[in-house]
Amino acid sequence: MRDWTGLLELLVTAALVVRMTVVGFVRRPGAIFSWPMFSHGCSIVVDLTGTKDGVAEQINVFDLFPTGDSLALTTTELQSLCDYLMGRYDSVDGQGHMWYADGETTIEVVAGRVVLPLPD
């Protein structure tokens, strides 16, 4: 009976090592690595201002995310956030920076739309 237990432990350990290797190092389309801390090809830091009935207020994006959710935004996620905020505000505007594989660039939000600079 003891021999089976040792063999079972070895098989379970080997299966976990193979799974961690595949999950950790096999690339998914659009991801640098598949681990969450390496999953974004870009990261955006932006200051947003919402205007409602002519009154402007700063938007704290950290208040809008569920606890433990990723705070590194991509352009698609930023646009989704702006679409959500347009339900609360008449206009959402802002400026920030985007870091990605080719370097850094400025980014703007104008009337709830994410605006990227034209490539050189």
Image (cartoon, helix red, strand yellow):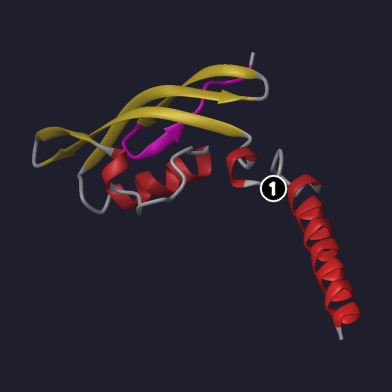
> Which of 13 and 26 lies nearest the eye of the viewer?
13
Q: Is residue 63 left or right of residue 43?
A: left
Image coords of residue 9 (percent x, y): 81, 70
> Which of 58 and 39 lies nearest the eye of the viewer?
39
Q: Residue at x 75, y 49 (%)?
A: 28
- Amino acid under disc 1: Ser
Is 23 part of what is drawn in magenta? no
**Image quadrant where residue 13 sits:** bottom right
Is 113 part of what is drawn in magenta? yes
Can you name the residue that lies furthest to the top here? 120
Q: Disc count in the image? A: 1
Q: Is residue 45 above or below residue 74?
A: above
**Image quadrant where residue 108 sits:** top left
> Which of 33 and 74 lies nearest the eye of the viewer?
33
Image coords of residue 41 (percent x, y): 63, 35
Most common SS among magenta residues = loop
Q: Secondary structure at mark 1?
A: loop
Q: Residue at x 44, y 43 (%)?
A: 79
Image coords of residue 48 (percent x, y): 29, 32
Q: Residue at x 59, y 46 (%)?
A: 36
Image coords of residue 82 (percent x, y): 36, 44
The residue that disc 1 covers is 34
Q: Is residue 74 left or right of residue 64?
A: right
Q: Magenta segment range? A: 110-119
Where is the N terminus found, in terms of image quarters? bottom right
